[in-house]
């Protein structure tokens, strides 16, 4: 079976999903049946869609006209849950861009509604070939006993970044949570990847301490630090800023009694103590979802692991 897929969203990061879906369509791994956006789609979106595909402003209309097996939700964070619910009600499996939802109540609701369906999340680092490399280095004792996990990143984001959409830099829009903070959106990968390496991605932390700061005139934070504590596993500390003087690619750091592992998860550069390791290309999460439906391949970034 070759699954049929649609993409909710056409601009911003949704364009990346459209490009990936079209590449998989051309490869025969899925059928890209259409896309939707409440705004006028950019010209690139029209070019990316194959002949006969549906392009509409209404998600329900798209689902009704295409009856897809897969819906990719690549819209603003506060719209993920209602669109995911709409797609699930239409019988779809999901790929939901990060962050999949914005609070634990929404997470529990989506988890319940998605039972019996595949629900992949958009944490691309979970598909990295570096994951087994880092885990193997830890298991082989190359850095001794793990004493802590950290992640950090620093990017330059000017005022126009927070003016790009009504939800940018906001905590709530129209009474709905948005929580567009440094660690909850742009550096959500850092948090999720650190928890994955720690082996606690599916666990609720028992202790949480957070520091939030802002240099810009925004509701939310542009600089943040969080410490997550677990019983039977090291603490995870993540710090990030969008108000840096220079871009520094984010990384996960594994502290051990004999050394450290540094993983730059966007470039997949892994350093174990002083030894640099080259890893293969990452696994595409949409391709993985299609293979899961077609061949039973395990999901790389299931909702439960986020």
Image (spheres, helix red, strand yellow):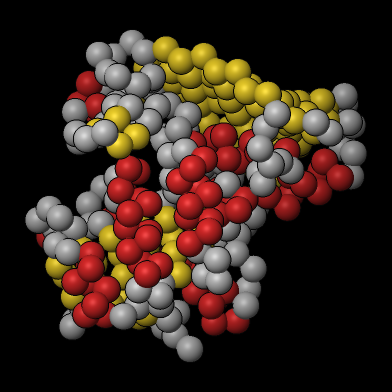
Q: Using the image, determine if residue 215 lies above or below residue 157.
A: above
Q: Is residue 209 left or right of residue 109?
A: right
Where does the image place residue 100, in percent across and percent down from the top left? Answer: 44, 48
Q: Left or right of 74: which side holds 151?
A: right
Task: Please give the count of numbered marks on the rendered protein.
Answer: 0
- In terms of depth relative to the viewer, which is nearer, 80 or 150? 80
Is 168 situated above or below 67? above
> What residue sits 60% from the left and 81% below the top?
295
Note whether 240 is above or below 98 in the view shown: above
The answer to whether residue 208 of the structure is visible from this angle is yes
104 vs 250, nearest the viewer: 104
40 relative to 93 in the view: left or right: left
31 left or right of 183?
left
Residue 129, image x, y percentages? 64, 55
Residue 226 at x, y percent in the picture: 57, 22
Q: Residue at x 68, y 24 (%)?
A: 207
Q: Within the image, what quadrant is residue 46 found in? A: bottom left
For residue 73, what is the image quadrant?
bottom left
Is the residue 160 above or below the residue 50 in the image?
above
Residue at 25 percent across and 13 percent down: it is 217
Q: Position of residue 235 (x, y in %)?
A: 73, 26
Q: Is residue 247 visible?
A: no
């Amino acid at each position: 079976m070759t699954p049929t897929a649609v993409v909710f969203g056409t601009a911003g990061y949704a364009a990346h999903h459209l490009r990936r879906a079209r590449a998989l369509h051309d490869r025969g791994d899925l059928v890209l049946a259409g896309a939707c956006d409440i705004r006028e789609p950019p010209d690139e979106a029209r070019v990316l869609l194959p002949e006969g595909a549906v392009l509409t402003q209404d998600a329900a209309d798209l689902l009704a006209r295409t009856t897809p097996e897969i819906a990719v939700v690549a819209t603003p964070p506060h719209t993920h849950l209602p669109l995911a619910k709409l797609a699930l009600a239409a019988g779809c499996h999901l790929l939901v861009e990060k962050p999949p939802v914005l609070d634990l109540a929404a997470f529990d609701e989506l988890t319940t509604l998605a039972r019996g369906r595949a629900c992949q999340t958009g944490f691309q680092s979970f598909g990295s070939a570096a994951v087994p490399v880092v885990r193997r280095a830890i298991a082989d004792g190359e850095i001794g006993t793990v004493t802590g996990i950290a992640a950090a990143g620093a990017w330059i984001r000017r005022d126009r970044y927070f003016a790009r959409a009504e939800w940018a830099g906001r905590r709530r829009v129209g009474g709905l949570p948005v929580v567009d903070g440094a660690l909850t959106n742009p550096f959500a990968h850092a948090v999720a990847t650190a928890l994955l390496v720690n082996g606690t991605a599916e666990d609720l932390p028992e202790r949480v301490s957070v520091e939030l700061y802002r240099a810009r005139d925004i509701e939310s934070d542009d600089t943040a630090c969080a410490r997550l504590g677990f019983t039977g596993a090291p603490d995870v500390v993540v710090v990030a800023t969008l108000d840096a003087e220079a871009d520094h690619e984010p990384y996960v750091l594994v502290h051990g009694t004999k050394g450290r592992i540094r993983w730059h998860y966007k470039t997949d550069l892994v350093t174990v103590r002083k030894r640099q390791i080259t890893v293969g290309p990452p696994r595409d999460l949409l391709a993985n979802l299609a293979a899961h439906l077609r061949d039973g391949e395990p999901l790389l970034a299931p909702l439960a692991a986020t």
